[in-house]
Image (cartoon, rainbow, N blue to C red):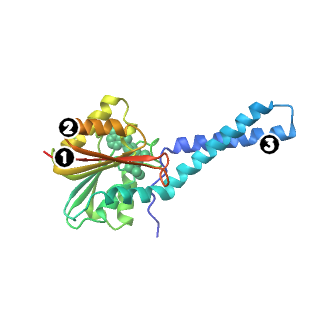
């Protein structure tokens, strides 16, 4: 029986980090056999940079294989799902949060939207999100759609909960990211909640939600099980 696979975030970055650390290791081994080829300060710099890249690559892999599931559960615990909600996962990728929410729904539905960017998540495809939903036994509780959060046709006030993890920073330009936050506000029903997690720009997302008169709190960064460390913005639509 195949297992669900939620992919590796920013796979090219992870590859580049391991490539640089392998190159640094090769340089060190070479200079052991050719002691005069690199001056000591340069060799120390190569060892230091290679070591940092290796550790960062490893932490990103650890997050992808272990931390992201803890972080998904942490995000979903911030809203008490009753079972009849309409949930939207913005930038669902292979369905991590959409499926996590769907597992708690009774007659509600979880929708995942994405533009399926290959550089943001490994093997990122609509079919993979649906396959994971099937493997996790929630295919009948999810909709997966191709849509860009900054230009979408989803109806106003249609979701009780909007979640998003590591998506909005991929949108180019501060104004476009603000537009994404305004769209999330538009899609939320009155009384609904947005739970947005990212490794940068979270202060800006909080400011945009605040300017829309939402009740906003920020939590994190979570240094133990996320890398890069993630911060969560929780914004409730009051009116
Ligand atoms: C790093 S992945 C994270 C996927 C998933 N949320 C997770 O935590 O496993 C970021 C996702 O955001 C999607 N994305 C980027 N820009 C988007 C946009 N403007 N609208 C919708 N999705 C977007 C990418 O295609 C990618 O699937």
Q: How busy is the neighbourhood of tag 1: few (under 14 within 10 Å), some, or many (20 plus)?
A: many
Q: Quadrant of ligand 1?
A: top left
Q: Secondary structure at mark 2?
A: loop
Disc 1, SS: loop
From the Cβ of disc 2, is ligand 1 less than 8 Å away?
A: no
Q: Decide: marks 2, 1 in contact (CB < 8 A)?
A: yes
Outermost residue, left side: 239
Q: Secondary structure at mark 3?
A: helix
Q: Position of residue 77 (x, y in %)?
A: 32, 60
Q: Are marks 2 and 3 in contact (CB under 8 Å)?
A: no
Q: CA distance from mark 2 to mark 1?
A: 8 Å
Q: Closer to the camera, 110 or 62?
A: 62
**49 w.r.t. 109: above or below:** above
Q: Earlier in the sequence, mark 2 or mark 3?
A: 3
Residue 172 in which image quadrant: top left
| x then y, percent, for residue 122 | 48, 48
Residue depth check, mark 3 versus mark 1: number of the one nearer the observer? 1
Residue annotated with mark 1 = 237
Residue drawn at x 64%, y 41% is: 19
- Residue bearing the label numbered 2: 212
Q: Which residue is mark 3?
A: 29
């Amino acid at each position: 029986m195949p297992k669900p696979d939620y992919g590796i975030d920013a796979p090219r970055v992870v590859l580049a980090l391991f490539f640089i650390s392998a190159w640094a290791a090769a340089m060190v081994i070479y200079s052991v056999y050719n002691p005069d080829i690199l001056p000591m300060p340069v060799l120390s710099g190569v060892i230091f940079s290679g070591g940092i890249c290796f550790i960062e690559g490893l932490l990103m892999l650890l997050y992808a294989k272990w931390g992201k599931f803890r972080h998904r559960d942490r995000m979903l615990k911030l809203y008490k799902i009753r079972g009849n909600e309409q949930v939207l996962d913005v930038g669902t990728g292979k369905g991590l949060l959409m499926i996590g929410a769907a597992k708690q729904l009774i007659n509600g539905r979880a929708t995942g939207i994405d533009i399926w960017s290959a550089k943001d998540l490994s093997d990122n495809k609509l079919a993979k999100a649906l396959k994971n939903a099937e493997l996790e036994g929630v295919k009948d509780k999810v909709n997966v759609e191709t849509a860009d959060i900054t230009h979408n046709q989803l109806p106003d006030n249609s979701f009780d909960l909007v979640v998003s993890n590591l998506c909005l920073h991929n949108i180019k330009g501060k104004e476009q990211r603000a537009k994404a936050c305004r769209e999330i506000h538009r899609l939320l029903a009155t009384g609904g909640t947005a739970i947005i997690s990212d490794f940068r720009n979270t202060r800006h997302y909080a400011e945009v939600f605040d300017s829309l008169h939402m009740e906003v709190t920020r939590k994190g960064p979570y240094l133990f099980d996320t890398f890069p460390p993630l911060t969560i913005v929780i914004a409730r639509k009051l009116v």
